[in-house]
Image: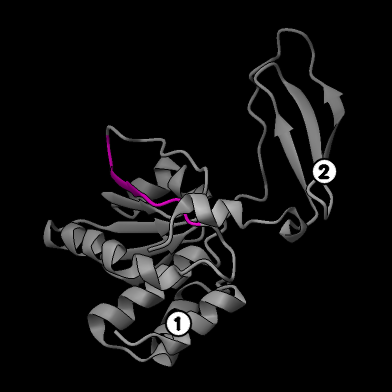
């Protein structure tokens, strides 16, 4: 049995990618967070909005609202789709399987959530989550629901879970399951460890 504590304990800062994140605070300050390879961060302020103009809506043009429709009851996307009520309603999403680390479920009164905080690391045992995730997807399907599976980017963890579901429940080979999911959402890319586990997975 794996535990989240073990995975976090084994997590190395060296694995963090360089990244910049734009943040707009509730007071309207725009900040740029930068992270280096060592995981060290610094924050610089880009600009200050006028006083009284706080909580202004800042459009984020990099939102990823593209949903991959894998089956009529099974969708794959990023945390952006999970946080966009218009998209969720348009696709009639009733259930959300959140396999991200540290992403909040925004609509608990309207949707049924299941959260598994999975780390996107090659040595995370992604296959150990397949049974539990598939059970949740099956429950939603039996209720006539539609499940959105998402992680942060909708690229590695959530795509691996969906590929695993197709292999486990529909008996597809890895190649078939992978190509179907890739066709529905071209940006998917399970990390090398997940890819290897999926290739070796026997349902």
Q: Write down the residue under mark 2.
A: 40
Q: Quadrant of the C terminus?
A: bottom left
Note whether 116 is above or below 182 in the view shown. above
**Residue 130: where, in percent of width, then height?**
33, 69
Q: 7 or 166: nearer the eye?
A: 7
Q: Give the alpha-carbon distance from disc 2 to disc 1, as whole Å.
A: 33 Å
Displayed quadrant of residue 24: top right
**Residue 48: where, in percent of width, then height?**
83, 20
Sequence-first tag of 2 and 1:
2
**Residue 112: where, in percent of width, then height?**
26, 44
Q: Which residues are magenta?
A: 110-118
Tag count: 2
Residue visible at 46% across and 88% down in the picture = 199
Q: Secondary structure at mark 1?
A: helix
Q: 27 or 126: nearer the eye?
A: 126
Residue visible at 24% across and 58% down in the picture = 136
Displayed quadrant of residue 166: bottom left
Q: Quadrant of the N terminus?
A: bottom left
Note whether 7 is above or below 44 in the view shown. below
Res. 173 in view: yes
Q: Write down the residue under mark 1.
A: 198
Note whether 2 is above or below 172 in the view shown. above
């Amino acid at each position: 049995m794996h535990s989240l504590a073990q995975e976090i304990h084994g997590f190395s800062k060296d694995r963090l990618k360089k990244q910049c994140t734009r943040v707009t605070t509730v007071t309207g300050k725009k900040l740029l967070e930068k992270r280096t390879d060592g995981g060290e961060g610094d924050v610089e302020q880009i600009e200050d909005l006028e006083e009284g103009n706080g909580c202004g809506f800042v459009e984020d043009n990099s939102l990823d609202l593209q949903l991959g429709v894998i089956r009529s009851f099974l969708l794959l996307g990023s945390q952006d789709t999970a946080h966009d009520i218009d998209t969720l309603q348009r696709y009639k999403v009733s259930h959300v399987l959140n396999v991200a680390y540290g992403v909040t479920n925004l609509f608990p009164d309207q949707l049924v959530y299941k959260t598994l905080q999975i780390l996107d690391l090659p040595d995370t045992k992604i296959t150990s989550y397949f049974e539990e995730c598939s059970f949740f997807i099956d429950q939603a399907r039996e209720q006539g629901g539609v499940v959105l599976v998402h992680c942060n980017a909708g690229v590695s963890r959530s795509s691996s879970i969906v590929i695993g579901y197709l292999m486990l429940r529909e008996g597809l080979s890895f190649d078939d399951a992978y190509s179907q999911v890739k066709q529905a959402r071209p940006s998917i890319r399970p990390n090398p460890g997940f890819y290897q586990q999926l290739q070796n997975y026997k349902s």
